[in-house]
Image (cartoon, rainbow, N blue to C red):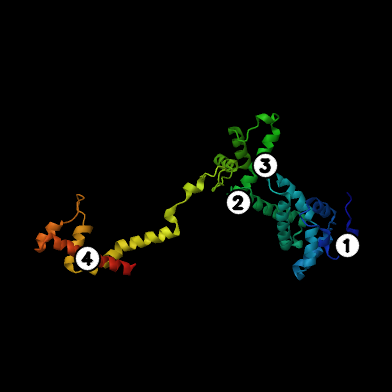
Amino acid sequence: MTLPNASTAAALTPANPWAMVPPLGNLDAYITAVNRLPMLTLEEEQRYARQLREDNNLESAGRLVLSHLRLVVSISRQYLGYGLPHGDLIQEGNIGLMKAVKRFDPDQGVRLVSYAMHWIKAEIHEYILKNWRMVKVATTKAQRKLFFNLRSMKQEFKADTHDADSYRETLTAEQIDAMAEQLKVKREEVIEMETRMAGGDVLLDPAPSDDGEQSFGPISYLSDAAHEPTAVIESQQRDALASQGISTALEALDSRSRRIVEERWLKVNDDGSGGMTLHELAAEYGVSAERIRQIEVAAMKKMKKTLVEYA
């Protein structure tokens, strides 16, 4: 396929250059179209970049983006092995390209194609890490670099193995040492990342079984009711009632009723036994045991009312 040269670029590009690019949904047509778009000369690239930087000329920005869409397609093909749609990879790469165009400085002496590669790859990397697993396998910059390098090296090991049947998905000790040395990381870091990559996603809440019986998944035993908001509030209320609430309720009683309640319900001796019995209290106050019980019942009712008001 012969690409238009710089002298015919302006004639081939319509007033609205985006009209040359079909929707990304038709992937084959999109790739064919972007490969036919004219490439810019150094002079054209710098002129459009200055118009964008100095005058915020969006048409110039569009021409810079269009002329590098083929670069995004080329880079995105390197990441097809992650099981993600090619169209999505291209779309994310296009976002990186637009970010590069926005930040491009034509006076740095670097062509946009070299500058944009970093932004395109960074955006595709971010998309892969967010969507390759439900749970992120890499969060720090060092882990992300190790993730992509490790996966690439595993593919090289597989390609170097003549007997495909003898290739194992798990790394051998020699391969781990070789990777750690080549990537200049610790052996433990390679093992940890390999473990993350090898682990698949687990459905926390499984679908009902065909026989209608209830099925259980990790969600059944991962839930912690103690940290559920309602349970936390109830626990806090119980703690408040058991401390300040009880003290407030006791203060509402007369001295005799308070001592009876404390001896009967709140006092615990060192040997684990409780306080005084009805008969012991009756002997102390010179009344019958039944009278002590009546005072106790009346005091408990009064305390209950005070606790309700406190709550």
**Nearest the eye: 131 or 1:** 131
Compared to 201, does 276 lie above or below? below
For disc 1, the marked residue is 10
Residue 299, which numbered label?
4
Number of other residues with Cα within 10 Å of mark 4, as a class: few under 14, some 14 to 19, many 20 or more: many
> What residue lies at 79% left-to-right and 60% top-to-bottom?
64
Upstream in the sequence, badge 3 or badge 1?
1
Number of other residues with Cα within 10 Å of mark 3, as a class: few under 14, some 14 to 19, many 20 or more: few
SS class, disc 2:
helix
**Nearest the eye: 232 or 95:** 232
**Disc 4 or disc 2, which is closer to the eye?**
4
Q: CA distance from mark 3 to mark 4?
A: 78 Å
Check if mark 4's residue and mark 2's residue have beta carbons within 8 Å.
no
For disc 2, the marked residue is 141
Residue 152, which numbered label?
3
**Disc 3 or disc 2, which is closer to the eye?**
3
Residue 101 located left or right of residue 284: right
Upstream in the sequence, badge 1 or badge 2?
1
Upstream in the sequence, badge 4 or badge 2?
2
Which amino acid type is marked by label 2? Lys
SS class, disc 1:
helix
Q: CA distance from mark 3 to mark 1?
A: 41 Å
> What residue lies at 75% left-to-right and 69% top-to-bottom?
56
Which amino acid type is marked by label 4? Ala
Q: Quadrant of residue 236?
A: bottom left
> What residue lies at 17% left-to-right and 68% top-to-bottom?
255
**Disc 3 or disc 4, which is closer to the eye?**
4
Which amino acid type is marked by label 3? Ser
